[in-house]
Image: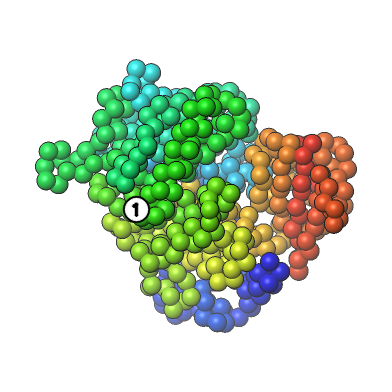
Amino acid sequence: MRKIVLFILFFCSYLAYAQTDTEKISYHVIKTDSQGDLIPWYNDDPGISYDHIVNMVWKFWDTMRTDLNGLPYYMNHQVWKRDHNDFRGIGGDQFSMAISSWRMLYDYSGDEKVLDNIQFIADYYISHSFSGGDCKWKNIPYPYNTLIYSGNYDGDMILGKGYTQPDKAGSFGSELVNIYKQTGKEIYLEAAVNIANSLSEHMVAGDGGHSPLPFRVNASTGKIGVLNEGTASEITYAYTTNWTGTMSLFQRLIALGKGNTANFHKSFEILLSWMKQYPLKTNKWGPFFEDVGVYSDTQINAVTFARYILENPDQFNDGIGSARHILDWVYHELGNPKWEKYGVSVVNEQTSYRVPGNSHTSRQGATELLYAAKTGDLKAMERGILQLNWATYMVNDDGESTYPNGETWMTDGYGDYVRHYLRGMAAFPEIAPANQNHLISSSSVIKRITYNEVNILYETFDQNSVELLRLKVKPKEIRGDEVKLPESDISKQEEDWEWKPLKIGGILKIRHQKSNKIAIQF
């Protein structure tokens, strides 16, 4: 691990860079270090650049114009148009992705407006998207607004009104559990339990052509969606591997003891067993996106599961090897060599749309960094930083975050973008900005956090938790529920903290098992 830290410090300390005369990536002229490797466009220091783009992207989202029906633009559309409105509804996982990113951003920033946005999105989506109690697939959200300005979500982009995507319901339910932990409001937990109940009721064993839950299904009739039914080109939607969010939903409710935990445990085991038996062996990762009507293997499904494996290695015989297998499959099947002369391995979105993506490459980068943190693999660490560097070029000076093809997606440029930088910092706190104070990871949900010059105060949902922070200076004192916590020694006490000094500031690790209100004094 020490070698990796030293490498990061060296990597981030290049002073000289070369700027190409004309070649750009999206908005910006390419910048390289003295070795010819890509560096971020905004600043030579990755931490300063990552922090800048995260804040600019959030500001753009927060100040996006109000639409004709009185809702923020991102509540109606999947693609931003600067001078007019795009006439497509939302992306399939648009709201879950945003909530996921903003929860991490709240921990990182303490900005109450971020927390307000999380609750606004969740409240509106709960009250305007769920299937009726008389449906075969009841009490789960629809992923699309078939009438753009209706303010209601009632179907699927490809198959139309009445169709839903169970994998997106699972992702939203998982985020609702986190919001419940953050706010204490039972309505979020109730909605999450209802989603879990509905998904659990329909769980089957699955096989090589059918996942335990279908990709697209009619909520009222239970019919699995088809396109061009009865023709030679018939395409079924019985298969996807995007079940990480659904597995997390079941796990979180089981841990809380909420809902039918016996059924949730059984459903979780079915999904995990199927993921091991089929896609992990076949690399048939299947569809994810709402606007694709053909079978396609997607990087998001594959690498999201690779992250799950790295975060839950005890559930796999060879977790590290399995995660590496998935990451390598992406390079083999979806690698894009266009920017290899700048040292960066960019990845394409999916097999039916082999176009490089900012969210996909930053996801790959954040997962490479997690893999490197687990293994000490310096090459994986370098790949990850270069991939995050490449993806910074998609953000304009005003925070507009575009896809390399020129469209500004609410998913790829916002919800499914910001979180990968914050996850990268969580894996390697050394790449967080050195001249600022930030909480960058917690094993518990953070309920509240405030930053100021004299202290940082935060409250976790769980008493038993571990936090990592990147700080400008070493704290003078840390308290948990008003009790002074000792600085760690070799014995590692139940509640303590340790400090790792860096060239500027350092990394603080806090462990607590009996307290959940933490005060860091400077």
Say whether residue 493 is visible: yes
Q: Does 34 sit left or right of 354 as displayed?
A: right
Where does label 1 land, which residue? Answer: 284
| Residue 305, x across and y down, in percent | 47, 50
Name the residue furthest front: 317
Image label count: 1
The quarter of the rendered structure image containing the N terminus is: bottom right
| Residue 127, x across and y down, in percent | 45, 24
Q: Does 486 sit left or right of 285 as displayed?
A: right
| Residue 353, x across and y down, in percent | 30, 58
Say whether residue 124 is visible: no
For mark 1, does the 10 Å Cα neighbourhood hold few (<14), some (14 to 19), or many (20 or more) residues?
Answer: some
Where residue 163 sits, quadrant-wise, is: top left
- Nearest the viewer among 358 and 372 is 372
In this figure, which colouring scheme has been used for the structure? rainbow
| Residue 87, x across and y down, in percent | 29, 42
- Nearest the viewer among 292 and 273 is 273
Where residue 107 sits, quadrant-wise, is: top right
Q: Residue at x 85, y 53 (%)?
A: 491
Q: Residue at x 62, y 57 (%)?
A: 427
Q: Residue at x 29, y 45 (%)?
A: 209
Name the residue furthest top: 134
Q: Residue at x 38, y 72 (%)?
A: 337
Q: Amino acid at mark 1?
A: Lys
Q: Does 137 sit left or right of 487 as displayed?
A: left
Mark 1: secondary structure: loop
